[in-house]
Image (cartoon, rainbow, N blue to C red):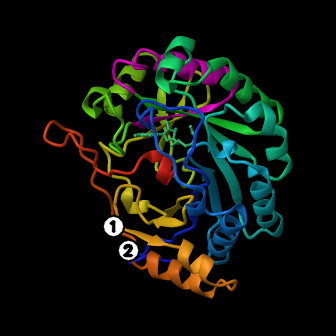
Amino acid sequence: MIDPFGRHISYLRVSVTDRCDFRCVYCMAEDMTFLPKAEILSLEELDRACSAFIRKGVKKLRLTGGEPLVRRNIMSLVRALGRHLKTGDLDELTLTTNGSQLERYAAELKEVGVRRLNVSLDTLDPTKFTAITRWGKLDQVIAGIEAAKRAGLEVKINAVALKGVNDDEFDDLVAWCGERDYDLTLIEVMPMGEIGGEARLEQYLPLSLVRASLNRRWTLDETDYRTGGPARYYVVRETGKRVGLITPMTHNFCESCNRVRLTCTGTLYMCLGQHDSADLRAPLRASESDALLEAAIDEAIARKPKGHDFIIDRRHQRPAVTRHMSVTGG
Ligand code: SAM
C-alpha cells in the first residue's frame, strides 16, 4: 500500500475496544459513554480486517484500545493473529496496555508470538498514580510489568509528560527503567477529546523542556534507532537504555508516517490528528468475501492526508480532534 505522498503503509494499529478499566485524566472523562455492542466489530471481524491489511502488506500490527486486555476473549484474537507470524507474513504483533491485566496474560502473550509490549506508566508514586488514572492501582501494574519480564517479553514504558503532575519524576523514571532494563518513551499530551475539568493548557509540557532537564543529570547520546514509530531515541549513557521522545506538538513527524488506525467499530483513520476516515464495517458485513473490504482499504489509503496540525494555545481551548485517544487507539 502506497499513499499519495509515496509513503509505504506497513503498520496498522487496532483499537479492539473503547472500554478501559482506568480513566486517565488526560485521556477520558470520568463518565464516559461507551459504544453499544452492535457497533463493535466481533473478534472474528477484527481478525478478517487485520488479515486483509496483512495481505496488503502490513508487517507490524499493534493492538490497543481502550484497554485491549479487558476485551472479553481477547486472547482468541491474539492467538489467531499469531498465525501470520508463523507464516512470516507479519513481522511483529504487539500491544499497548495499561498493564493491569498482565499478570494474567503475559505468559500466554509470549506463547502466541508477542515479543514486545508497551506499558503505559506515568508515575511511580502510588497516590499520584491513582490521581492520574482515577481508578488504577500502581501495585497491580508493577506486578503486571514484572510478570511480562518474567515471561520473556521486552517491555517499553510509555509516560505522558504532564505539567505539575509528573514533571518532577522524569529522572526517577529514567533510573527505574535503567535498573530494570526497560526502554522509556515520553509523550507530549495531545489535544484529543473532551476530558472534563482539566484544561489542556494546564497539562501541556513541551518535551524540549523535559529534554533540557534530563540533560542536567543524564548524558543522552543521539541515535538513529527507529521502531517504525514517531519517537526520536537517545541512549542514556549511564544506564545503556533508550529514552524516546514523541513530540507531536513541537515536532511534526508526519513525513515518515507509515501507519493507519482502525477503531473497534471498523472506522479507519488515516491520520491520528485528522477527521477524515473510511468505514470498513459496512464492507466487512456486506459479504463473506473480502473483495469489498479490500476495495475500501485501497480507496482509504489513496486519501491518506499529508499530516496533522495539533495546536494547544490560548486561542484553541477546544480539542483539535473531538474523538478521544481511547477511540482511535494510542
Ligand atoms: N489502555 C492502553 C494504555 O494505557 O496504554 C492503550 C490505550 S491508551 C489510549 C494508549 C496511550 O495513549 C497511553 O500511553 C496513554 O497514556 C496515551 N494517551 C491517551 N490520551 C493521550 C493524549 N491526550 N495525549 C497523549 N497521549 C495520550
Specify start and end residues of the magenta stretch as a single range: 162-188
Q: Determine whether, in the image, residue 264 is placed left or right of residue 104.
A: left
Q: Position of residue 23 (x, y in %)?
A: 50, 32
Residue 259 percent across, percent down from the top left: 50, 62
Asked if residue 165 is among those painted magenta in the image, a careful observer would answer: yes
Q: Nearer the viewer, residue 6 or 38?
A: 38
Q: Is residue 109 magenta?
A: no
- Residue 288 in sight from this viewpoint: yes
Which residue carries the number 2 mark?
Answer: 5
For image coordinates 72% across by 34% down, the residue present is: 101
Q: Could you classify mark 2 by the number of other residues whose Cα lies within 10 Å: few (under 14), some (14-19), or many (20 or more)?
A: few
Q: Answer yes or no: do the residues labelled 2 and 1 have beta carbons within 8 Å? A: yes
* Mark 1 surroundings within 10 Å by alpha-carbon count, few (fewer than 14), some (14 through 19), many (20 or more): some
SS at mark 1 in the image: loop
* Residue located 40% across and 71% down the image: 304
Label 2, label 1: how far apart the Cα atoms are: 7 Å
Identify the secondary structure beneath mark 2: loop
Q: Which percent across, then down, holds residue 62?
A: 62, 54
Out of 198 and 174, give the one closest to the viewer: 198
Is residue 243 placed above or below 132 in the rendered structure? below
Which disc number belongs to residue 306? Answer: 1
Q: Which mark is residue 274?
A: none
User: Can residue 330 be seen by looking at this rendering?
Assistant: no
Q: Is residue 222 above or below residue 93?
A: above
